[in-house]
Amino acid sequence: MKKFIIKATTLAGVGTLLVTGALPVNAEDTTSDGTTKDESVYVVLNADGSVSSVTVSDQLHNANGFSNYQDKSDLKNVQNLKSDDPVQSSSDGYTWTTTDTDIYYQGKTTKALPLDTTIEYKLDGKTVDPKDIVGKSGHLSMTFNIKNTQTKQYTIDGKTYTVCQPFYVAAGGMPDQDHFTNVKIDHGTVSTDTSHSIALAVMMPGMKDSIGQFLTGDLSSLNDYLFDTVTIEADVTDFESPTMMMAASTDLSALKGELKDDGAFDTTDLFDQLDELDAATQKLIDGSKALYEGADQLKDGANQVNDGVGTLVNGTSTLTDGTSQLAEGGQALVDGANQASAGAAALQAGLGQLVSKNDTLVSGANKIADAVLSSAQTQLREQLKNNSITLTWDNYADVLGDYNNINNDMRAQAKQKIRSAVEAQTGPLDESTFNGILYMCASNGCTSEEDIKNFLKSNTASLETANAVATAQNDAALIGKNDFSKIDSILNLALYESSISTTGNTIKAATGVTVTNAQAEAVWLAIASHQIQSDNLAAIENIINNIPADQTQRGIHDETVQSVLKGMRTQATYSNEVIYSGICATLKSMKITDATQQAILVTIAGELHGDAGSTSDAFKGASADVTTATNVKNMITDGNKEENQSLINGMLNTLALPELKSELAGVTKQLQDVRSFVAGLETYTAHVQSAYTGSTQLVAGLTALTSGADTLNAGIQKVNTGAESLSSGAKTLKDGTQTLSDGATQLSDGAKTLYDGLVQYNEEGISKLTQNSDLDNLQTASKLISDIQNDDDAYVNYSGISDGTDGTVKFIYKISTVKSEADTEKDAASKSDDTSDVQESSDKGNFFTRLADLFIFWN
């Protein structure tokens, strides 16, 4: 029964929604002056659905004729179709005066239509222009897309809905069976006669968007019948454009009587009755629940009373005995309550003082925290040399976590650490030489202090060579200026400052010759003695003759050597200064490199000391060491080039980064601790406030307790007096409570059965009936349709209608046929119109023939 009621109500509502929505809304307009205007709009569409022309035919009717009737209309080129009465224009239309009861006229307009139409053609699944497929064959589909542009907003139960003006549209075609077979149309029917297939579908454009949201649950399938497109499909042979037409109207008055004459589908009373039934059922459920709960409480109470009375009877004597003790305890309670109340008041006062300082305490802590943050910002700016750094409590972690702030100071610190490590092995270095060593480290991929230490350890000889090269370059510059008097001082200074071992390294770096400590000492002693023995000249000549071939390739030729020896022999007793001057001048005139000059000088100095044999052996390895010195010198030069500074700075940045991370992490930790402190302080003050609030409640409670204790003590005295009476009455009460308990149990059981039954009735019956969401949606739709019906501004005319005039309107569309160029030229020559095909049709009784007949009289 329940399902039947729901389905019947649903079907009734849907019938009302889908049919009455398209009824003429002011067919019973009480403001009518007795004039009606029935309008037919004839639209010729191009093959693609675009508008070719619009002709409007109007029929004015008034049983009393027309006297200066102001007909509102925006038509142009108006013609009177039934009489010779002239057409008189007015400001917003035309004026009619005639004794005739009917006036027929037609005119033209370019006004936008309420329904926009597009037609899409596809042949074998590909979109085509119909002009391009004339005479072709394949599977053809023609789709009518109709958009309802007439919308209006209505408000139902506080919610606004946009609804399209209901239009019924019949659309289809009448393809020739000689060219079209297997004709199908979605949402419609196909019938045939002797020569044509007749495909027809009826739609309500825009209604799915308007009311589809209300068709839920069991009603959702109805959305399948609300559509805006219709597609005709067929297999075509030698395609010729078929006859295709549409008709649209808002007037379905014939259906109104079937739906409304006996009020069978008026859903207003139905929804009201369902609401009343739901409310009454709910009240019944609430009442039965209250009855059940009360009866159950009564049963529990009766049982408790019965049990309590037995205990009461047994305890009355004990009560009587204890009342005296109770009286004594009552006084003790009063005293204790007074003491507790006084203590609570003191606690409240103390907490009040703490609370009064909460804001000051929190404010001061926040100021301290802000000062710490500001100080951190200032120090960070100074240390990183970046005044754009800004720290806030929201961003400090992100800012301090950014390690891209390494500046020149940090790189200088990293650079100094490397210098200390290098000079520990080489002694003091000038800036140019040190930059060369940095470049060597960076070029070898050093990215940490450990990498640099390992590099220095494995390249000790190169570092010492670098220092020696730098020293040799400075000395050679002095010699190149012919300041020969300074040779002794240069060599002496090197010997004294660097010791004998350092002198050997310096000789190696400057000349490329590896010498022993004894040879290094001999060089210095030979220079210092200022004496050259003539018998050593033969040894010197022997050493020079044994210079390796690669040294000869550096520019030392035999005649040059002999020249040098000749000069040395003639000056065997000259001072060291004179000998050096002659040698240097001779070597310099031959443009021999500084490193080579130094190698020869050192070799000769060793010979002067008398150690010709060992010196000669050492000199044989000079070539390789000179090459090493040259390579080191090149590295020093490259290390001081501007374009290589980025490589050095990159290494210094990498070395400075760990220290920067450590420092920034420390600052971050300090700021986090400060912030945690402030948060903890805020939590503390909140707890103090909470404790103060609790103490206030405690004071109030203890005050009430004190008052109650006094009252209790007075009552105890009365209890003591009535205890004996209670003992006597308890025995009588015991006898009656058993009967009460039995009756309460029966009442509770019956009330529970009633409540359970009503709940089941509501859940399985009334609730599903009255709380059905489909009915709720249908009720909303019913109200919406009612508003549309009663809307004075509903769509009843296209070209214009005067106030007080009742109107109806219908639209008849004809789609122009598509022809081949030959047929088009033939038609142009014969000046035939578009209705010729329709007029020649033998199917005089079908829908499309009747529509075509309407076109005949106005074309």
Image (cartoon, rainbow, N blue to C red):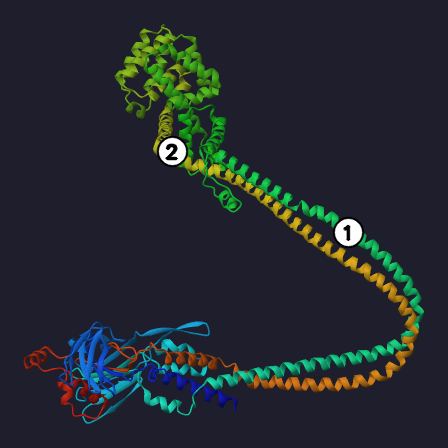
Q: Nearer the viewer, residue 612 or 608?
A: 608
Residue count near mark 2 (Cα–Cα under 10 Å), binned few <14, some 14–19, many ≥20: some
Residue 214: percent from the left, percent from the top? 42, 78
Q: Nearer the viewer, mark 1 or mark 2?
A: 1
In this picture, residue 630 sits left or right of residue 755: left
- Give the residue at mark 2: 645
Residue 190 position by quadrant:
bottom left
Q: Is residue 697 above or below residue 812?
A: above
Mark 1, Cα crowd under 10 Å, few <14 / some 14-19 / many 20+, is some
Gap between marks 1 and 2 measured at Cα: 78 Å
196 vs 545, left or right, is: left
Q: Secondary structure at mark 1?
A: helix
Q: Give the image location of residue 374, x and y in percent.
A: 54, 38
In x, y percent, where is residue 364?
A: 62, 41
* Residue displayed at 22% across by 87% down: 101
Q: Which residue does the numbered mark 1 point to in the structure image?
A: 345
- Considering every residue shown, the one lying at the far front of the view is 67
Query: Front-most of 549 and 169?
Result: 169
Q: Is residue 812 visible?
A: no
- Residue at screen point 62% across, 84% down: 284
Q: Dots 1 and 2: beta carbons under 8 Å?
A: no
Residue 638 left/right relative to 702: left
- Find residue 365 and name its label: none
Secondary structure category for the residue under label 2: helix
Please state which of residues 153 and 119 is positioned toward the viewer in this rendering: 153
Q: Is residue 696 above or below residue 45?
A: above
> The residue under label 1 is which amino acid type?
Ala
Image location (x, y in percent) of residue 62: 25, 86
